Image: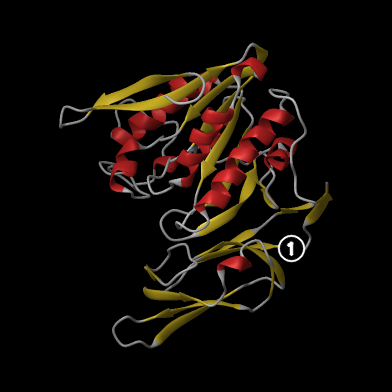
Amino acid sequence: MSGAGRVEWIPVCTLASGAPLRLAVHCVDGARDGPSLGVVTALHGDEIVGIEIVRRVVERVDPRALRGRLRLVPVANPLAFETLTRNTPLQVEGGNLNRVFPGTAGGDPAHLMAQALAEHYLPQITHLVDIHNGGTHPIVDYCISLGDLAMTRAFGQTVIKDMGEMGRSYTLAGTAIQQGRPAMIVEVGGGYFRDEHYAQMGARGVFNVMKHLGMVDGTPELPARQHVVDEVASIRPRHGGLLYPAIPVETLGQRIAGGTLLGRVVSPYTFEVLEELRTPFADGIVVLLRPAVSRVNPGDYAFMVADLEGARILEN
């Protein structure tokens, strides 16, 4: 491996092909005692930027200057990564690995991967950063606080959705919290747009959290202000077709007025406009969008907007 540390493997099961299913954990042990930070990416197989974030952290970290340990999982769902899909091949129900935690010994491969992470990975760490991306089409940029707002702020994103301690028990982060391990969720990048920008942002964010936890020297690099919001609306189409965005990629992270047209769903057969998608809040910030024309089905992620009414603005 490049960079510091070593790779250890968590065995999961044997597939019908005879191939072993296992999870790679990059382990970096510091020269002095401190927290054990876990970083997990690619719970959904089409979320590629997170893998590059982990690679950059492994390359950059200096064990001699590290207090504590890093335990990083670049690909938490090898089956979905192989097919470049959000959902998990061979998963009997639902398809979303991040909805079956803490898993079960008698389940399908997704349940077994969840169980391996819950029972053999989470006990190795004291804090968790669970990184997600927009996937194949959308780009996303916000994070979710699950009870430790200070750690979430330290990552350095502009918009923070505060869920208190309402971590969903069926997710990896929710399972970590149930085990008494502070956790946060990062949503950053995707869509094969601005990959370099978001890889840099993500790696900087992980080091920011390490600084916050006292694992490395320095002060987190934060934006001038951060918005802590209670609601982030998912704007999903009711009709399938081609989604034509009405806002440019530069709108991501920008304020947007109520009723603004976000995009149109157009029939690829008749070319009629089937639906217009608009922002629901009088004052909001765009945190997810599709930057290019793309196919959508009813219920797909198209746009997400954070509600700024009543938001807390934190100056840094």
Q: Position of residue 296 (x, y in %)?
A: 38, 68
Residue that appears at 41% across and 56% down: 136
Residue located beneath label 1 in the image = 308
* Closer-to-camera residue (242/249): 249
Taking the image as shown, residue 87 lies to the left or right of residue 16, namely right
Q: How many marks?
A: 1
Task: Say if residue 18 shows up in the picture.
Answer: yes
Residue that appears at 27% across and 44% down: 89
Quadrant holding the N terminus: top left
Q: Position of residue 104 (x, y in %)?
A: 36, 28
Taking the image as shown, residue 37 lies to the left or right of residue 79, namely right
* Closer-to-camera residue (275/40): 40
Q: Which amino acid does label 1 sit on?
A: Leu
Farthest-out residue, right: 315
Q: Please say if 263 is above or below 157.
A: below
Farthest-out residue, left: 17
Q: Where is residue 308 in the image (x, y as percent from the top left)?
A: 74, 63
* Closer-to-camera residue (19/235): 19
Farthest-out residue, top: 32
Q: Please say if 230 is above or below 243.
A: above
Q: Position of residue 203 (x, y in %)?
A: 59, 39
Question: Element type at marker 1?
Answer: loop
The residue carrying pointer 1 sits among few (fewer than 14), some (14 to 19) or many (20 or more) residues within 10 Å by Cα, namely many
Q: Quadrant of residue 103?
A: top left
Residue that appears at 61% across and 46% down: 201
Taking the image as shown, residue 5 lies to the left or right of residue 115, namely right
Q: Say how the picture is coloured.
A: secondary structure
Task: Say if residue 239 shows up in the picture.
Answer: no
Q: Please say if 268 is above or below 67.
A: below
Residue that appears at 46% across and 81% down: 275
